[in-house]
Amino acid sequence: FEGNILPDIEAFSTVLNPLQIRKDLYRSFYETHLNEIPEKFHHILRCYIPETEKFPCFDLRKRLLERRFGPAFGNLKRIVLAGMGSSFHMGLTARSIFQNLLPAADIRVVQPSEIDDIRRQIFPETDLVVLLSWSSTTADMMEFAKTLRQSRVVMIGITEKVFADMALICQKSGGVIPILSGEEVTVSGIKSTLCMLFCLHLFAVWMGQQMKTAGGWDYAEKLRQIPDELSSLVTDNGIKKFAARLAEKNARSHACILIADAAYLPVCREAVFKLEEC
């Protein structure tokens, strides 16, 4: 630096042409991501349940799982779903599906910050930990994964960022399931959280198949129908008009109170995140 003052930058104008393709113009990213969800679900199904297969197929280290938990995972007593924020809510939402498809296993949903001593609360011989994080870079999740590895606990990661820190640790254990959501701009996740939930349900079906429990095939068929049902939902003009009227009527409200029974409380908590962003 010579100490000379730089001249002011002259103003200029630029025209970008052609316009971006496959991008909704003059709409919020929230709405754009919402409309992407049905196709994202179709893509997930094409990758994990090809038309020639009846059950999901994941690139997991099945032999390691069988060495730890035995044939048909007979020694597996508990599945721990761990996540923070929205990922924690998705784990709570999916818990009932795991309980229905895996009645012999105890299903627990935790936030890593709740666990003081892994050696007293997670048991390597009988527990499988599923780590939920879109970015795989959340500090609590990375530290939790490192501690699980030191304790020789088998873990599986469900994430978008398969080359980030948490995912790389999980790759050396039970493996990683990419949620295939793509990038997301909104602060409170829209498509990413639902893609994670959808993959969690597929993983529950896969676990049911490995443990030879009933009901997995029927539930897999129901999952195949969800993308088309979602597509009808997000394109329903009646619902859009109702939402517009509701928003206009309550735009100046000082507070928004969400009420739900116990079964839908995790969804209610996630809705709070979405409304806070608005």
Image (tube, rainbow, N blue to C red):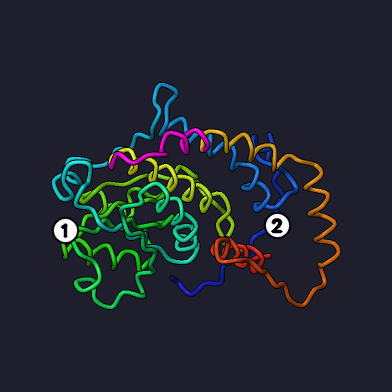
Please indicate whether residue 115 sits to the left or right of residue 62 in the image.
Answer: right
Q: Position of residue 63 (x, y in %)?
A: 17, 40
Residue 158, numbered circle: none
Q: Which residue sits at x=36%, y=74%?
A: 113
Q: Residues within 10 Å of mark 1 (few under 14, many from 20)?
A: some
Q: Position of residue 144 (x, y in %)?
A: 29, 67
Residue located beneath label 1 in the image? 125
Q: Position of residue 205 (x, y in %)?
A: 39, 41
Instruction: Look at label 2 and name its amino acid.
Output: Ala
Q: Nearer the viewer, residue 185 or 109?
A: 109
Quadrant the C terminus occupies? bottom right
Please indicate whether residue 55 sits to the left or right of residue 251 in the image.
Answer: left
Residue located beneath label 2 in the image? 11
Q: Secondary structure at mark 2?
A: loop
Which is closer to the viewer, label 2 or label 1?
Answer: 1
Distance, label 2 to label 1, CA atoms, is: 67 Å
Tell me where the magenta segment starts and ends, as one range.
211-222
Say how many tags the image has.
2
Q: Is residue 164 above or below residue 144?
A: above
